[in-house]
Image (cartoon, rainbow, N blue to C red):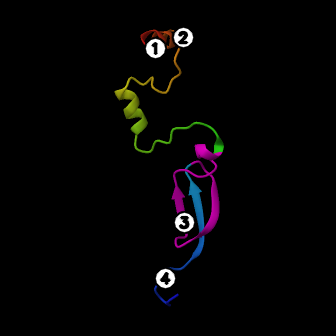
Amino acid sequence: MKPKIHPKYVQCKVTCACGASFETRSTVEKMHVDICSQCHPFYTGKQKFVDTAGRVERFQRKFGGSYFGKKGKDEAGKAEASA
């Protein structure tokens, strides 16, 4: 490595929006993240909509808000009858 051209590699404290924190190494001393391995749906196994820009709410308003809900018996029967 050439001297005096690389940033310093220091201990970094990472803090998540869920409250979890851990230490790693980086070129910055503190880092704030929106999602981490303790709250990410892939690692937790729970379905959770990560929405930072309001896109889920906008989608639900546009398409009636029932897109993510489960179909009832009446709706499922109508879907089968029309197919």
Q: Nearer the viewer, mark 2 or mark 1?
A: 1
Amino acid on which disc 2 is placed? Lys
Q: In the image, is residue 34 above or below residue 27? A: above
Disc on the earlier residue, 2 or 1: 2
Gap between marks 3 and 1 measured at Cα: 52 Å
- The residue tagged 1 is 79
Distance Cα–Cα, label 2 vs label 1: 10 Å
**At numbered mark 1, what does the secondary structure look like: helix, strand or loop?**
helix
- State which mark lies toward you, 3 or 4: 4
Residue for badge 4: 6
Earlier residue among tags 3 and 4: 4
In percent of the image, x 40 and y 39: which residue is there? 54
In the image, what residue occupies the spot 49% across and 27% down? 68
In the picture, the disc for residue 73 is: 2
Depth check: 66 or 34 in front? 66
Q: Earlier in the sequence, mark 2 or mark 3?
A: 3
Q: Which image quadrant is residue 44 in?
A: top right
**Quadrant in which the C terminus is drawn:** top left
List x then y, in percent, for residue 59.
38, 32
Question: Which of these two is toward me, 37 or 82?
Answer: 82
Q: Amino acid at mark 4?
A: His
Read off the residue under disc 3: 30
Span shown in magenta: 18-43
